[in-house]
Amino acid sequence: MLGATIAGIALGFYPGIAKARPLWWRLVAIGAVTIAVVLSLFPPIAGTVTDAVIASRADSTKAVPVLLKRDGPVLAGQALTLRDARDQRVLISVLCTPEVAAAIASTEAPFVLNVQRDGSDARFTSASIGAVNPAITLPYIMGLEERARIIFFHVPMSWVATVAYLLSMIFAVMFLRKRTMEYDTISMAAASVGTLYAILATVTGAVWAKFNWGSFWNWDPRESSIFLLLLIYAAYFVLRSTIDDAQRRARLSAAYSIVAFVTVPFLVFVLPRMLPGLHPGSADDVNAGPLLSPKSDAINTTKQILFGLSLFSFTILYFWLVNLRVRTENVYLSITDREANQ
Amino acid sequence: MIEFLTANAGYVVLVCALLIWLGIGIYLWRVEKRLLELEQRISR
């Protein structure tokens, strides 16, 4: 997580936060986000036989996608003997529909089979087959399933918003030290694009919460803290819009940006972990803890790599947006200065 | 049609997400190009 962020920030600052992006940089940004979107949504979700047993015990009607391999001949009308492609010691017997059996008979490669437990932990039925020989698969997480993909969009948005507010504060300090107006523009641009990311994190989280927790908004501590954060930074933009004198506006908003950032570590890292809530990492979270903790087994290597790629691509996209915002403001200031001097 | 979309919901989401992103990407590319032209005109 830290590596992807640092790589994104390093590339984001090249060749200068207010300088035009070279062609290769723009191609890297567009390519990285495209790859991140494809790799976040394309790989099928496939669990192990153990996942299928646990999930089917909780809900016997649930079909669980499992990565399996054929282990023996396919005989019409008979249950097939299939092997767990990840844990090769596990063999199960699956009674398939003729169409699924025909699809399995035509391949030697592993395949994703949607199975339902049939009375015992070694006997299943299946009515549909998923991807055959998938290059990569994402782990099956009971209760989340396809909705687990939110981690590739929601978490990077939220994390980049935090980095954005840090950058805004750093450039605010630099403005107060050097009194260069460009630092004020960068501080404003960093906060405005950061707020856009925070809004996107809130919206993606709300849509996900509707399907997983039952309503769009639950006043969970993390939801409440992002709401407070959005209010604090909304006040920053209101403050900027109310002052006409550029120097005074820059000075006051720099001071406000520094004070506003003091709340960010508390609202993002401390408060949601102190109180019980619905998000992973809350005080009463006894299952996985923080989803990205290296000690946690809730996230596997493939998912960590894809998450890193997603984080990197959304970070450089952030810097591109900040760059465009800064340069647009600079062009606007140049034109108004020129008109004032004429 | 509805059966096809339901059975391939994951791919439908992927195509929609890619179309939205490509739209944003093209828009950013055009803004970058026009901004560069404006900056060059101002510096002249």
Image (cartoon, coloured by chain):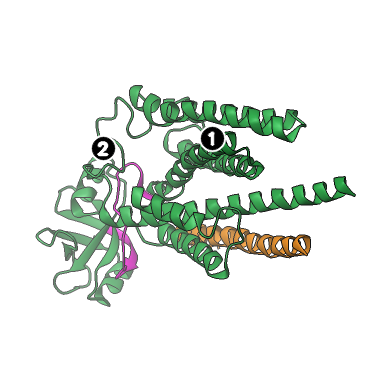
Chain colours: A green, B orange
Q: Nearer the viewer, residue A132 or A342?
A: A342
The image shows residue A188, relative to residue A20, as above or below, that is above
Q: Residues within 10 Å of mark 2 (few under 14, many from 20)?
A: some
Q: Which residue is pictured at 46% across the width and 49% down the height?
A: A153
Secondary structure, mark 2, is loop
Cα–Cα gap, marks 2 and 1? 38 Å
Same chain for mark 2 and mark 1? The answer is yes
Amino acid type, label 2: Ala
Amino acid type, label 1: Val
Q: Nearer the viewer, residue B21 or A3?
A: A3
The picture places residue A104, in percent across and down from the top left corner, at 26, 71
Q: Chain of mark 2?
A: A
Q: Residue furthest front?
A: A178
The image shows residue A183, relative to residue B28, as above or below, that is above
- Could you tell me how many numbered marks the image carries? 2
Q: Chain of mark 1?
A: A
Instruction: Give the residues in magenta.
Output: A126-146
The image shows residue A65, relative to residue A155, as above or below, that is below
Q: Are marks 2 and 1 in contact (CB under 8 Å)?
A: no
Q: Nearer the viewer, residue A97 or B6?
A: B6
Q: Nearer the viewer, residue A25 or B24?
A: A25
Which of pointers 2 and 1 lies earlier in the amino acid sequence? 1
Residue under circle 2? A288
Q: Quadrant of residue A196?
A: top right
Q: Is residue B2 visible in this depiction of the protein?
A: no
The picture places residue A66, in percent across and down from the top left corner, at 26, 57
Circle number at residue A173: 1
Secondary structure, mark 1, is helix
Whether residue B33 sits left or right of residue A259 in the image: it is: right
Q: Which residue is pictured at 19% across the width and 63% down the height?
A: A85
Q: Quadrant of residue A87?
A: bottom left
Q: Is residue A131 magenta?
A: yes
